[in-house]
């Protein structure tokens, strides 16, 4: 089963804080997305 994390914001511009969050989430999930990916489905 895919585990998708949706980040309630944007990674633009990508900061060290964003990278830290991503690095800690990688072992837990299959995919990470920010809100801009999901907006095209609404």
Image (cartoon, grey):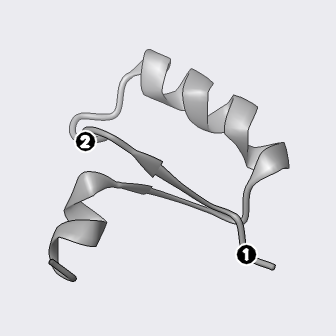
Please say if 39 is above or below 24. below
Q: How many marks?
A: 2
Quadrant of the rendered image containing residue 3? bottom right
Which of 39 and 11 lies nearest the eye of the viewer? 39
Q: Residues within 10 Å of mark 2 (few under 14, many from 20)?
A: few
Picture layout, residue 10 above or below residue 40: above
- The quarter holding residue 20 reads top right
Instruction: Report the mark closest to the observer, 2 or 1.
Output: 1
Return the residue at label 2.
Answer: 10
Q: In this image, 12 relative to 23: left or right?
A: left
Residue farthest top in this picture: 17
Q: Under tag 2, what secondary structure?
A: loop
* Residue at (32% x, 40% y) in the render: 8
The one nearer the camera, 3 or 24, is 3
To which residue does mark 1 refer? 2
**Quadrant position of the N terminus in the picture:** bottom right
Q: Residue at x 53, y 30 (%)?
A: 19
42 relative to 29 in the view: left or right: left
Determine whether the residue tagged by mark 1 lies in a helix, strand or loop. loop
Query: The C terminus is located in which quarter?
Result: bottom left
The answer to whether residue 10 is left or right of residue 1 is left
Picture quadrant of residue 37: bottom left
* Residue nearest the viewer, comparing 7 with 23: 7
Counting residues from the start of the chain, the first of labels 2 and 1 encountered is: 1
Instruction: Bin the neighbour count of mark 1 within 10 Å (Cα to Cα): few under 14, some 14-19, many 20 and up.
Output: few
Residue at (58% x, 27% y) in the render: 21
Q: From mark 2 to mark 1, how far is it between C-alphas? A: 22 Å
Determine whether label 2 and label 1 are within 8 Å by CB.
Answer: no
């Amino acid at each position: 089963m895919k585990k998708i994390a949706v980040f309630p914001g944007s990674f633009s511009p990508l900061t060290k804080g964003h990278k830290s969050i991503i690095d800690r989430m990688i072992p837990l999930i299959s995919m990470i997305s920010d809100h801009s990916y999901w907006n095209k489905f609404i």
